[in-house]
Image (cartoon, rainbow, N blue to C red):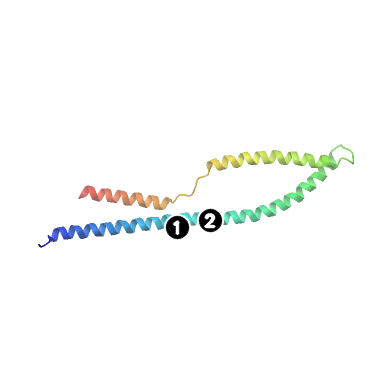
């Protein structure tokens, strides 16, 4: 029983299309992985540099706050035995600043978005539209 050359061509074409679609899907997955990896790498670098900056800033802030507490004690009209009042004034200011910073952090956190592989999603949409267009033509 001989096979029809037209049906062989159709079968071969279907197989080629299947292989190409499979290849495209794998490439899109790799593109998405690469995009997410790039974004995560940038995020990690920013975190490391931010932690280093934070350590230096906190150390400097400790010295500054200690000096401000002594300055507040010196300026306040309290007795020379009441050193703690300067530290209470600085602590109160810190609580106010901490509350404001917490409010801002909550607002920024609500506005943040997780990383999305935008290029891969765009490419997948283009492939989908192309395949739909080719199906309509045939």
Q: Give SS at disc 1.
A: helix
Q: Quadrant of residue 15?
A: bottom left
Crowdedness near tag 2: few (<14), some (14–19) or many (≥20) residues, C-alpha within 10 Å: few
Please name the residue shown 44% across and 56% down the image: 33
Q: Give SS at disc 2.
A: helix
Q: Quadrant of the N terminus?
A: bottom left
Please name the residue shown 15% across and 58% down the image: 7
> Residue reaching furthest bottom?
2
Question: Left or right of 75: which side holds 104?
Answer: left
> Residue reaching furthest top?
77
Residue 14 place in picture, x, y as percent: 23, 57
Q: Residue 33 versus residue 101: which sits nearer the camera?
A: 33
> Residue reaching furthest left?
1
Question: Left or right of 12: which side holds 105?
Answer: right
Please name the residue shown 54% across and 40% down the image: 110
In the rendered image, which residue does mark 2 sit on? 42
Mark number, residue 17: none
Please name the residue shown 14% across and 58% down the image: 6
In the rendered image, which residue does mark 1 sit on? 34
Nearer the N terminus, badge 2 or badge 1?
A: 1
Question: Left or right of 56: which side holds 78?
Answer: right
Q: Quadrant of residue 96?
A: top right
Q: Quadrant of residue 77?
A: top right
C-alpha span from label 2 to label 1: 12 Å
């Amino acid at each position: 029983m001989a096979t029809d050359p037209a049906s062989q061509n159709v079968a071969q074409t279907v197989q080629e299309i299947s292989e190409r679609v499979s290849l495209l899907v794998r490439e899109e997955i790799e593109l998405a992985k690469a995009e997410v990896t790039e974004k995560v790498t940038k995020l990690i670098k920013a975190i490391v540099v931010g932690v280093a900056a934070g350590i230096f800033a906190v150390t400097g802030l400790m010295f500054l706050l200690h000096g401000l507490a002594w300055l507040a004690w010196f300026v306040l009209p309290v007795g020379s035995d009441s050193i703690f009042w300067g530290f209470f004034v600085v602590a109160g200011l810190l609580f106010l600043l901490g509350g404001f910073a917490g409010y801002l952090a909550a607002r920024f956190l609500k506005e943040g978005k997780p990383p999305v592989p935008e290029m891969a999603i765009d490419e997948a949409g283009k492939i989908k539209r192309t395949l739909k267009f080719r199906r309509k033509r045939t």
